Image (spheres, rainbow, N blue to C red):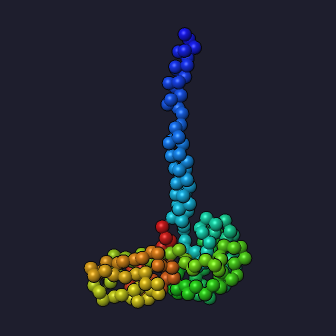
């Protein structure tokens, strides 16, 4: 009788500690989802804009050792070393994607086959004159990708998929209401 009781106890104990097929699949799929979220968070945690033809952020962080070859190669002085890696600092000139930084990169962190994008996107301040009336549209005129527009109520319409982070909009805003921040 003791064996039967032990078997019942073991069966009751195991029912709450076994994994069903559904639970197994849920765990497997959730683990994949968590891995995707982890990779996506690396892009969100990007600390700076990157040279225009930089590889994915996680790979860029591994490949770019901060050698600085790309810094003097930039004819506009847009590339700086930030936290030991190449970064784009668009303050006084926009990036025309001349590819000179990519040409000198020997580490593989910049690839000419990648579509140029600095990873920066404009943030338009609330005191933007275009928001108050339809008087100023310098950012719209300057954007070669047509990523910025205003609706009839003078609210900013920004298409992140079109923006390549060149910085032309920031430089066109002579009131300084546009700042460029890493995407995410």
**In the image: residue 62, left or right of residue 142:** right
Residue 102: tell me if it is visible: yes
* Quadrant location, the N terminus: top right
Q: Nearer the viewer, residue 62 or 146?
A: 146
**Residue drawn at (52%, 57%) of the image:** 37
**Residue drawn at (57%, 14%) of the image:** 3
**x, y (%) of residue 146?**
43, 84
Q: Is residue 95 above or below residue 49?
A: below
Quarter of the image holding residue 174?
bottom left
Residue 173: tell me if it is visible: no
Farthest residue in the right direction? 106
**In the image: residue 17, left or right of residue 146:** right
**x, y (%) of residue 59?**
64, 66
**Residue drawn at (49%, 31%) of the image:** 16
Number of numbered tags placed on the structure image = 0
**x, y (%) of residue 133?**
27, 84
**In the image: residue 74, left or right of residue 183:** right
**x, y (%) of residue 183?**
49, 70
Q: Nearer the viewer, residue 107 or 2?
A: 2
**Residue drawn at (58%, 82%) of the image:** 78
Farthest residue in the top direction? 1
Q: Nearer the viewer, residue 35 or 15?
A: 15
Farthest residue in the front direction? 21
Q: Is residue 144 above or below residue 44?
A: below
């Amino acid at each position: 009788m003791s064996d039967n009781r032990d078997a019942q106890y073991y069966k009751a104990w195991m029912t709450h500690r076994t994994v069903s097929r559904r639970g197994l699949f849920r765990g497997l799929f959730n683990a994949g989802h968590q891995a995707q979220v982890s990779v996506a968070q690396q892009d969100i945690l990007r600390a700076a804009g990157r040279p225009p033809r930089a590889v994915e952020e996680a790979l860029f962080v591994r490949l770019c050792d901060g050698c600085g070859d790309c810094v003097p190669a930039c004819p506009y002085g847009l590339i700086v070393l930030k936290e030991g890696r190449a970064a784009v600092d668009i303050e006084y000139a926009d990036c025309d994607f001349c590819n000179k930084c990519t040409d000198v990169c020997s580490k593989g962190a910049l690839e000419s086959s990648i579509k140029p994008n600095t990873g920066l996107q404009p943030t338009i301040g609330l005191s933007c004159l275009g928001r108050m009336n339809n008087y100023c549209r310098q950012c719209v005129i300057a954007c070669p990708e047509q990523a910025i527009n205003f609706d009839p109520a003078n609210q900013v319409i920004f298409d992140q998929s079109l923006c390549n982070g060149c910085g032309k909009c920031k430089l066109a805003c002579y009131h300084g209401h546009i700042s460029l921040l890493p995407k995410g």
